Amino acid sequence: MALENKLTEEQLFDQLISSLVHSAWVSLGKIKNPMNDVMERNLDQASIQIDMLDMLHKRMSGNLSENEEEYLGHLVRELKMNFVEEKNKPAEESVATNSDEKDESINEVKTGEALPGKGKKSKPVENEAKENSNNEDEKSEEKE
C-alpha cells in the first residue's frame, strides 16, 4: 500500500465504530441485513455489539477528542435505548419499522454528522410502531 493512500488513525477509528454501529442496527432489526436484504432481529448479537462499543468508549476515555467522546457516548446511549425498546416489543412488531429514519441514522454514522444536540430528533418509537401497525391493518383490509 502506498504511503499516501494510508488511512489516518482517526479514519480507521471512525470506520471501526461505524462498522460496529451498523452491525448493531442490523441485529436490532432496524435496518436490512446487507448480505441478504432481509430485516432480521438478533438481540443477543445486538447486545454484544453494543457492549463492545460501550467498552471501547470506557477504555478510550481520556484518549479521544471532545467531539469523539461526545459522539461515541451519544451512539452508545442511542443504541442502548433502542435495544431496550426492541427487547420490550412483541416479536411480530420487531421488524415493522420506518426504514427512512433508520437509513438517515446510518448516514449520520457514516458521515459523522450526528453529534449530540445536532440534527433532527427522531420521533418516538412508540408512535412509529403505532403508525406501522395502522399501515399493516390497512394493507390486510385491502387484501380482504
Image (cartoon, rainbow, N blue to C red):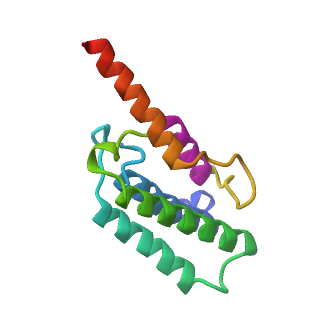
Q: Residue at x 34, y 44 (%)?
A: 93
Instruction: Report x, y in % for residue 63.
Output: 65, 83
Looking at the rendering, which quadrant does residue 61 occupy? bottom right
Which residues fall within the magenta stretch?
99-110
Q: Nearer the viewer, residue 54 or 98?
A: 98
Instruction: Report x, y in % for residue 85.
Output: 44, 58
Q: Nearer the viewer, residue 51 or 96?
A: 96
Instruction: Report x, y in % for residue 21.
Output: 48, 59
Asked if residue 22 lies left or right of residue 41, the reply is: right
Q: Residue at x 67, y 54 (%)?
A: 114
Provide the major secondary structure of the magenta segment.
helix
The reply to whether residue 121 is in sight is: yes
Q: Is residue 139 magenta?
A: no
Q: Nearer the viewer, residue 50 or 15?
A: 50
Query: How many numbered markers are drawn?
Result: 0
Looking at the rendering, which quadrant does residue 139 occupy? top left
Looking at the rendering, which quadrant does residue 38 occupy? top left
Image vertical order of residue 59 relative to residue 6, above or below: below
Q: Residue at x 31, y 17 (%)?
A: 141
Instruction: Report x, y in % for residue 135.
Output: 42, 26
Q: Residue at x 43, y 34 (%)?
A: 132
Q: Is residue 100 magenta?
A: yes
Quadrant of the snapshot with the C terminus: top left
The reply to whether residue 8 is in sight is: no
